[in-house]
Every structure is written in C-alpha cells, then in structure tokens.
Image (cartoon, helix red, strand yellow):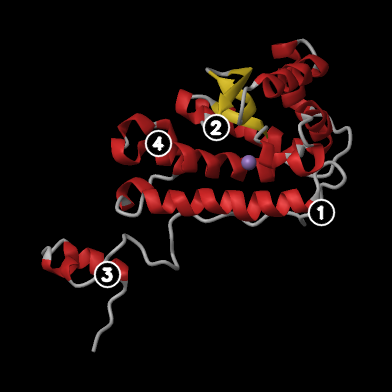
Amino acid sequence: MTTLTRRQLLQCAGAGAAALAFAPLTAWAADEPPFTVPKLPYAYDALEPYIDAETMKIHHDLHHGAYVTNLNTALKDQPEIAKKGIVAILRDYKSLPETIRQAVINNGGGHVNHTMFWEIMKNNPNGKPSGELAKAIDSAFGSFDKFQTAMNDAGAKRFGSGWAWLVLNNGKLDVISSANQDSPYMNGQSPIMGIDVWEHAYYLKYKNKRPDYLKAWWNVVNWDTVADRYSKALKAKA
Ligand code: MN3
C-alpha cells in the first residue's frame, strides 16, 4: 500500500475534490510548517545584565513561538501566499483575504520583527556604529546622540505596545514608531533596526520604567548586523 504525504494528497486534490474528502487536510504536514522560529544566535543569558535570561527565554520561545504558530495557522489554507515569504506578504498586505489579513499583520509582523530583533543584539556595552552607517546617521540626524534621543523618544512616547524603528524610507534614514506588531514593510519602508517596547520585552527587570530599558538597550546593539541590514536595504532600493 502506498502512503501519501499530506503534500502529495494536496496535489491529488487538483485532480478532483474527492481526494480532499477522506482527510482533514492542511496545506503542509505538522512537521514542516512554512514559518519557524529561528534559533537564538546566543545563549539566553548573553545579554545580561542589560536584558535578563528569563525575559529572553520567555520572549524568544513563547512570544515569538506563538506568533509563528498563529501565522502558520492563519495561512494553513494559503500555501501560495505563504511561499511568497513574510516580507513580500507584509509589503503587499492589502491584497490579503480580509478574513486572515489582521491575523497575518499581527503574527507575520511579530515573526519578522522578532527575527530582526534577535539578530541585531549582542552584548556590546557602549557600542557605536561605524563606516557608512555612522556617516548616514550623522547626516540624517546631526549626530549619533541626536539619533539615540530620537529613537528613545519614539519608544518612550509609543502609547501601549509597539516598536521604535530606524528605517530606510525612499533612500533616506528616518526614525518612526509603530503600534502592536505593525511592520515598517507595510508602509514600503525597510526596517534597519528596531527596539521592542512591548512590556514583555522588559517588564521582569525594568517593571514600569520603559525609559530605563531603552537607555540600557543601547548596550546590546550588534552594529555589524545593523550595518549589514542598512547596506542590503540600500542595494535593494537601487
Ligand atoms: Mn516582543
């Protein structure tokens, strides 16, 4: 007897709806969902004392984990959309079916935002950008200090949950904030770096003192990966 995988069964469905009748199909098997949580590129305690290990574990495993699970669920009957990748999906979110649009914005945004967040951090007390990125920041904001103040303001003034962002917007650097998990990709911008200001990102250690978390966060920036994101975003624009 031949055993078909769910993927093969789905392909059979093209030949007739009867193939769909005998199993409750999703578009992919449970062990091969299209979106997965990337492994944290360092230990949970690597960002101590600025971000504590327990916060990192809950944030990465549970919060990011839930966004990915919910994103896979939202797109379970939409393999054609899922295979475009999350950046392309969010850039074109207006074309999503209305029934899943908000779920994809929330959970797809949560997935792409956090994927960036883990990769732009490392333990790097008082680190600063260098090279082309440093020049571009100076030129856009006047100085690194002014840029930092703009980011901290954007994060502190974001009411409720959201993000503070450095984005590339029509070839120019800008600081913005977004609500919830809304991604800058939704506005045609490219996120270069972002600070998660949801309480889940800081509450265990900093309680209600979001500005203290924002101040400490600058000690965990991986400026190499931020510079890499900037150079890739510039090239994509050209
Ligand atoms: Mn978060």
Structural crowding at the residue carrying mark 3, measured as other residues with C-alpha within 10 Å and reported as few (<14), some (14–19) or many (≥20): few
- What residue would you read off at disc 1? 45
Structural crowding at the residue carrying mark 4, measured as other residues with C-alpha within 10 Å and reported as few (<14), some (14–19) or many (≥20): some
CB contact under 8 Å: marks 3 and 4? no
Disc number lying in front (3 or 4): 4
Q: Residue furthest front?
A: 208
Structural crowding at the residue carrying mark 2, measured as other residues with C-alpha within 10 Å and reported as few (<14), some (14–19) or many (≥20): some
Across and down, in percent, residue 216 comes to 83, 33
Q: Which amino acid type corresponds to the residue marked 1 in the rendered image?
A: Asp
Q: Which amino acid type corresponds to the residue marked 3 in the rendered image?
A: Gln
Residue 180's disc number:
2
Q: In this rendering, would 5 be left or right of 67?
A: left
Q: Which amino acid type corresponds to the residue marked 2 in the rendered image?
A: Asn
Q: Residue at x 74, y 22 (%)?
A: 152
* Depicted 13 relative to depicted 161: above or below: below
Secondary element at image label 4: helix
Secondary element at image label 3: helix
Instruction: Answer with mark 3 or mark 1, whichever residue precedes in sequence.
Output: 3
Q: Which amino acid type corresponds to the residue marked 4 in the rendered image?
A: Gln
Q: CA distance from mark 4 to mark 1?
A: 34 Å
- What residue would you read off at disc 3? 8
Q: Residue furthest bottom?
A: 1
Disc number lying in front (3 or 2): 2
- What residue would you read off at disc 4? 102
Residue 99: tell me if it is visible.
yes
CB contact under 8 Å: marks 3 and 2? no
Instruction: Answer with mark 3 or mark 2, whichever residue precedes in sequence.
Output: 3
Secondary element at image label 1: loop
Across and down, in percent, residue 149 comes to 77, 17
Q: CA distance from mark 2 to mark 1?
A: 26 Å
Q: CA distance from mark 2 to mark 4?
A: 11 Å
